[in-house]
Amino acid sequence: MNHFYPYNFGGLVRNFSELSSSKYVILKIPYEATTTFGKGTKNGPSSIIEASRNMELFDEETFSSGYLSGIHTTEDLLFENINPEKMTETVYNAAKNFIQMGKFLISIGGEHSISFPLFKAHKDFFDKIGVLQIDAHLDLRDSYEGTPFSHAAVMRRIYEICNNIVQVGIRSLSEEEGEFIKSYNGKIVWAREIAQNPEWIKNVIKSLPENVYLTFDVDGLDPSIMPATGTPEPGGLFYYDTLKLFKEVVKERNIVGADFVELAPLPGQPASDFIVSKLIYKLICYIEEKTK
């Protein structure tokens, strides 16, 4: 652990991390209740923060320092009751509070179930909004293991309030989901298409509305670079594929909020933690570059 930098995203001094003066807020949500195979997503937020404290803050691509607009890191969001339905209320209220302040909210989990209330809070504030989901799985089950608020049903809940969804990197689904998507209005960009079609990013952007909420399940990345997740699937996105997608979406659309979920850190193997912290920071740098 680097003891010399403050314990926040980027290890930022007070001038660049106070809530009042920061454009960005990193909301830590170490929630884990419905994961079904590998565990440990509750440790994701702290591992992302720790990695970010040891990351260079000058971006070599944009040749800029995105943190100069301020990045505030919250305390862990705590849950009096980890019941998935109660969780949605807690997360929704916390997110709404920061959006009302005019902050750009980047939430870090924790399991993917947190994305439904996060998106719902953004939808209350932004018109013409859709969702860009990066994921190995569709997450379109009606319910899973007794709850409609499972991580495996998160996109079904989102679809009920917004049918403008673009799902990228998908390579795993259930029979139930296979039936559901026969009459589904969302767009699925299968991982196999990405491997074969150099125009895939253009196709993604064409399907997105003006305002975009990004939900990034880290298992959307290939397990060769992202082994630290509960249900890894072969054939995912690589780092520069992902950066290209981020850059083009930022350029062509208006990303209004984001979450990064399902990191389950592996002891002694911090590379995955660094990838997620770097992706978050690259997103900030791209947004800042656009506003110059």
Image (tube, rainbow, N blue to C red):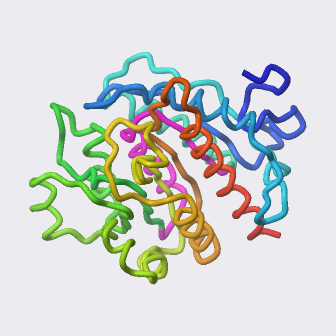
Residue drawn 66% across the image and 51% down it: 104
Q: Residue furthest right?
A: 15
Quadrant in the rendering for residue 230:
top left
Residue drawn 85% across the image and 40% down it: 16
Relative to 79, does residue 199 appear above or below in the rendering? below
Quadrant containing the N terminus in the rendered view: top right
- Judged left or right of residue 24, residue 125 is left
Residue drawn 51% across the image and 53% down it: 122
Residue 281: image location, x then y, percent: 69, 50
236 magenta-colored: no
Residue drawn 66% across the image and 34% down it: 51
Relative to 176, does residue 113 appear above or below in the rendering? above
Q: Nearer the viewer, residue 45 or 272?
A: 272
Q: Nearer the viewer, residue 127 or 147?
A: 147
Residue 56: image location, x then y, percent: 79, 45
Q: Nearer the viewer, residue 43 or 227?
A: 227
Q: Which residues are magenta?
A: 104-128
Residue 65: image location, x then y, percent: 84, 54
Quadrant containing the C terminus in the rendered view: bottom right
